[in-house]
Amino acid sequence: MIIVNTIDEFIKERSKLNGSVGFVPTMGALHKGHLSLIQHSTSENEHTIVSIFVNPAQFLKGEDLNSYPRKEAADIEICRVAKVDILFMPTSDVMYDSDELAILAPAISGYILDGASRPGHFGGMLQVVMKLLNLSKATNAYFGKKDAQQLSLISSMVKHYFINVNIVPCEIVRDKDGLALSSRNIYLSNEEREKALSIPNSLKLATQLIIGGETNCAIIKQKITEVMSGNITIDYVEIVDRKFCMIDKIVPKDTIILIAARIGTTRLIDNMWV
Ligand code: AMP
């Protein structure tokens, strides 16, 4: 595995790769969720590129940019063992100019849900993903369904800007207790983690209701809210179709149930694709 930090090095090393290339962009502090994306890539492509970059442009003022977990040595080892070909670890100066052209998230789908709670977040995320896709010239790029709205917006960007890459959605990886893996889970105390379990538990309950024939989204949202309230501060509970339009009735194979909530100072998101 080659580790590169600059654009010139990246381009030079990328040009040596022949055949299909899979790309997995991350912000590091790698866990089994990231690893599943990397494994998808190594199994489906001749070469795999991983990037680790805590992107300042997608953090709002007052968010956890400075405290975001950084585990460089462990991340390098995980990528090496996973047989990654190129690990790209740039600094902000390498990625951004002082006078940058910006990308705006779509006016509707980019400013609901997380786009409403974190205005500007998706623009910053799309900007870095655009740069990384242009650099990696990947055949396939792998993204987790955990960040469902992010995945949807990246797919839109690739379509709208005619970027030649196949976006591959990957399943959510959870801990044994059901909590979706996230680099931010390490912020949680034991007590907070217990409370956070009400997120996957409420999604489980929603699944049971739907299996039992419930299709009314208002009722499902109400039940989810009941399971979570008292434990955590709900940011939103929403049910959308795969185009991220709000819906009133569950449509099998075209529905996503989304939750964002705060436990203490930690904000977690989770979802279920129905
Ligand atoms: P991040 O490092 O948080 O920016 O995430 C990098 C990629 O890993 C994104 O495509 C995420 O959706 C994906 N990811 C993060 N957590 C999980 C998880 N628990 N399961 C599957 N994919 C995940």
Image (cartoon, helix red, strand yellow):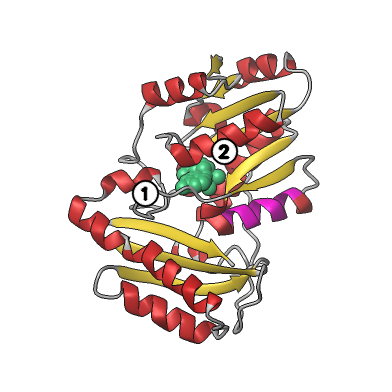
Q: CA distance from mark 1 to mark 2?
A: 19 Å
Q: Seen in the image, is 74 located left or right of residue 111?
A: left
Under mark 2, the amino acid is: Leu
Estimate the x, y position of residue 121 in percent, counting from the top left.
50, 54
Please determine whether, in this image, residue 244 is positioned above or below residue 135: below
Give the magenta-colored segment's residue range: 150-158
First along the sequence among labels 1 and 2 = 2
Can residue 104 be seen in this snapshot?
A: no
The question of residue 161 being in magenta is answered with no
Q: Indicate which disc residue 37 carries.
A: 2
Q: Indicate which disc residue 176 carries.
A: 1
The question of residue 154 being in magenta is answered with yes
- Look at the numbered disc 1 and give the secondary structure of its residue: loop
Quadrant occupied by the N terminus: top right
- Residue sitting at 59 percent across and 67 percent down? 274
- Residue sitting at 45 percent across and 25 percent down? 78
Query: Magenta region's main secondary structure?
Result: helix
